[in-house]
Amino acid sequence: MAGKVSTIGVLTSGGDAPGMNAAIRAVVRSAIVHGKKVKGIKKGYSGLMAGEIVDMNAKSVSDIIQRGGTILQTARCEEMYTAEGVEQAAKSCKENDIDALVVIGGDGSFRGMKEISSYGINTVGIPGTIDLDISCTEYTIGFDTAVNTAMEAIDKVRDTSTSHERCSIIEVMGRHAGYIALWCGLANGAEDILLPEKYDYDEQKLVDHIIENRKRGKKHHIIINAEGIGRSIGMAQRIEAATGLETRATILGHMQRGGNPTCKDRVYATTMGCYAVDIICQGKTNRVVAYKDGDFTDFDIEEALGQKKEISEYQYRISKELSI
Ligand code: ATP
């Protein structure tokens, strides 16, 4: 159980994700409704250590629910991997009267949060990452927007690919997690999907599949490649040489992180922001907010970080079956 909370700090950490602003807005306004003070911490743990902390009020978060990125900015902070860094972050919380900390970020950010909590700061994490790779939750802020952005871009590449009867390799984000690639593969009807979790990449098999599909009369061949496998440009050159078919690589990159959040990202991020404040007010600490089995819930941080999230075998299998 946590001690009594008067001031809640909020920060965003790791990669930015559309919908983070909706979560910040919900945390700030919900905290005010519960009679708490709120402080915004700039640039994740780096800003916390440097004391880049500002008072927030209801107005500080007006006109942001529809915006991508994060008004608090975000960072990756190397010092947090050291005991001194964690101690400095906890000291800064105390110096700024922050007795509860809401961290919006990915699993790395939650590991940092767990370290800070050992100094007696109450902590709650909100899953904010376009990668959807946090095991305890079926939803993370930003995935829906990112996957829709990628899907629309891939539709456009597909149009021109069909017109020119090309093979297209489209690289989407996901260094360790292939959710964006798998979802785009299904949503865009890709012929092949390459995922970091399924690294059985066999270029000869890919070449054979392209030739086989061309014989069947397919006018394009779309390969969705996850960032974790990468090397799309070299792959395109080798495939073109092996098949004799014009093959182009498109790397979607950071465009997938930006843009106005979808309705789902706004609504879920808002709900999670309010939920985080609710459980802080109930005296809970060291929790991660989640969406599981059709409802919002929360998990102990150890449990949240303990399991590895697997890709859906069923969806991976049907993506292959449907690419005939
Ligand atoms: P994304 O999914 O967007 O990559 P993330 O939160 O997983 O988000 P990381 O770069 O893994 O991104 O972590 C963000 C920050 O959290 C790190 O820069 C570091 O400051 C802190 N952090 C990560 N892992 C730990 C850890 N084991 N101990 C302490 N702090 C950590």
Image (cartoon, helix red, strand yellow):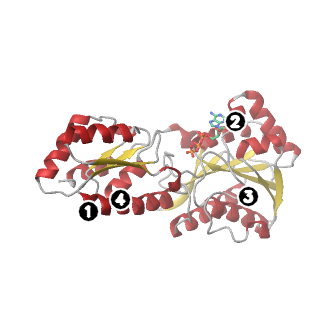
* Viewer-closest of 270 and 80: 80
Residues packed near mark 2 inside 10 Å, few (<14), some (14 to 19) or many (20 plus): many
Work out how far the residue at label 1 is from the one at label 4, CA to CA, in angstroms: 10 Å
The tag earlier along the polypeptide, 1 or 4, is 4
Task: Give the residue number, with chain letter if any, for mark 3.
Answer: 281
The tag earlier along the polypeptide, 2 or 3, is 2
The tag earlier along the polypeptide, 3 or 4, is 4
Q: Amino acid at mark 3?
A: Cys
Task: Give the residue number, with chain letter if any, for mark 4.
Answer: 157
Q: How many numbered marks, from 0 up?
A: 4
The tag earlier along the polypeptide, 2 or 1, is 2
Work out how far the residue at label 4 is from the one at label 2, CA to CA, in angstroms: 44 Å
Task: Give the residue number, with chain letter if any, for mark 2.
Answer: 115
Numbered disc in front, either 3 or 4 = 4
Q: Is residue 296 left or right of residue 223?
A: right
Q: What label does residue 280 carry, if any?
A: none
The tag earlier along the polypeptide, 1 or 3, is 1
- Circle 4 — which element? helix
Against 113, residue 79 (above or below) is above
Work out how far the residue at label 2 is from the one at label 3, CA to CA, in angstroms: 21 Å
Residue 85, position as x, y percentages in the image: 76, 32
* Viewer-closest of 54 and 207: 207
Residues packed near mark 4 inside 10 Å, few (<14), some (14 to 19) or many (20 plus): some
Q: What label does residue 163 carry, if any?
A: 1
Q: Is residue 117 left or right of residue 131?
A: right
Q: Amino acid at mark 1?
A: Ser
Q: Amino acid at mark 4?
A: Val
Residue 226, position as x, y percentages in the image: 40, 44
What residue sits 70% from the left and 36% below the top? Answer: 115
Residue 172, position as x, y percentages in the image: 43, 49
Work out how far the residue at label 2 is from the one at label 1, CA to CA, in angstroms: 54 Å
The answer to whether mark 2 is within 8 Å of ligand 1 is: yes
